[in-house]
């Protein structure tokens, strides 16, 4: 993970958004200023995040594309597309860290609670997956202090029995 993180960080730091921003007219296109602010947030999050090996190439390509696109004088739509792609990559990375790289939930699995080992085991068995955003991306949280709903209990029971995969179609 360290090598992947370092490689992506090298690509991200090669993009100097402040210098590139000087070439754009934010007064003529005010949406550009917001998009650049979002790119700064993506860059900051990228530099603070561990990068999963499965996402490394995509992240390096993304920052290479950001640099080339911005240096060629991108339109507001192109900059917004860069923002959208960056947010998707960060969400994919979060998923990869949780499921592929066996990284524990942010709020469990650190050995501080009696149940941490059980949560990690349940996740590795596919019985629990943690909370998701409205777009379906993992938040990386298990939220052990939340009460378990009937639906969550049923899902865990079905997953445990190997019957948890549903098509979403009523039968």
Image (tube, rainbow, N blue to C red):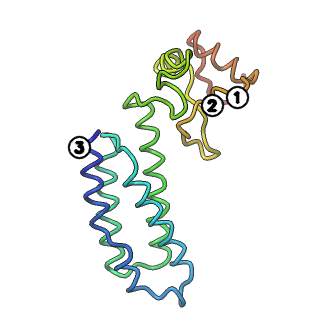
Between the C-alphas of marks 2 and 3, the distance is 30 Å
Q: Position of residue 158 (x, y in %)?
A: 63, 14
Q: Is residue 32 above or below residue 141?
A: below
Q: Residue furthest front?
A: 112
| Sequence-first tag of 3 and 1 | 3
Position of 89 with respect to 15 (left or right) is right
Percent position of residue 134, x then y: 65, 45
Up/down of 88 relative to 54, above or below: below
Q: Secondary structure at mark 1?
A: loop
Residue positioned most to the top: 161
- Residue 45 lies left or right of residue 63; in this view the side is right
2 and 3 marks in contact (CB < 8 Å):
no
Residue tagged 1: 146
Point out the image quarter for the N terminus.
top left
Q: Tell me the SS state at disc 2.
A: loop
The percent coordinates of residue 121 (x first, y second) are: 48, 16
CA separation in Å, label 1 and label 2: 6 Å
Q: Residues within 10 Å of mark 2 (few under 14, many from 20)?
A: some
Number of other residues with Cα within 10 Å of mark 3, as a class: few under 14, some 14 to 19, many 20 or more: few
Q: Quadrant of residue 129?
A: top right
Q: Do callouts 1 and 2 mark residues in contact (Cβ within 8 Å)?
A: yes
Q: Camera-side residue: 41 or 78?
A: 41
Crowd tier of the residue under label 1, counting other residues whose Cα lies within 10 Å: few below 14, some 14–19, many 20 or above: few
Q: Which residue is mark 3?
A: 3
Number of the label disc, if any, that sits on residue 42: none
Tell me residue 141's x, y (percent): 56, 35
Element type at mark 3: helix
Mark identifier at residue 143: 2
Q: In terms of depth relative to the viewer, which is nearer, 166 or 138?
A: 138
3D distance between C-alphas at marks 3 and 1? 36 Å
């Amino acid at each position: 993970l360290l090598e992947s993180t370092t490689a992506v960080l090298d690509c991200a730091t090669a993009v100097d958004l402040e210098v590139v921003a000087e070439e754009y007219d934010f007064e003529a296109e005010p949406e550009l200023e917001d998009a650049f602010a979002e790119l700064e947030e993506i860059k900051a999050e990228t530099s603070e995040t561990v990068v999963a090996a499965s996402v490394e190439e995509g992240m390096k390509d993304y920052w290479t594309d950001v640099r080339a696109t911005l240096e060629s004088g991108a339109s507001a739509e192109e900059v917004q597309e860069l923002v959208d792609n960056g947010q998707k990559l960060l969400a994919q990375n979060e998923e990869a860290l949780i499921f592929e790289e066996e990284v524990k939930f942010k709020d469990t699995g650190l050995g501080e609670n009696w149940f941490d080992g059980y949560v990690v085991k349940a996740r590795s068995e596919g019985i629990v997956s943690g909370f998701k955003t409205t777009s379906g991306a993992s938040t990386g949280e298990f939220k052990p202090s939340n009460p378990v709903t009937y639906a969550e209990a049923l899902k865990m029971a079905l997953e445990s029995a190997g019957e948890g995969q549903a098509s979403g179609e009523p039968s």
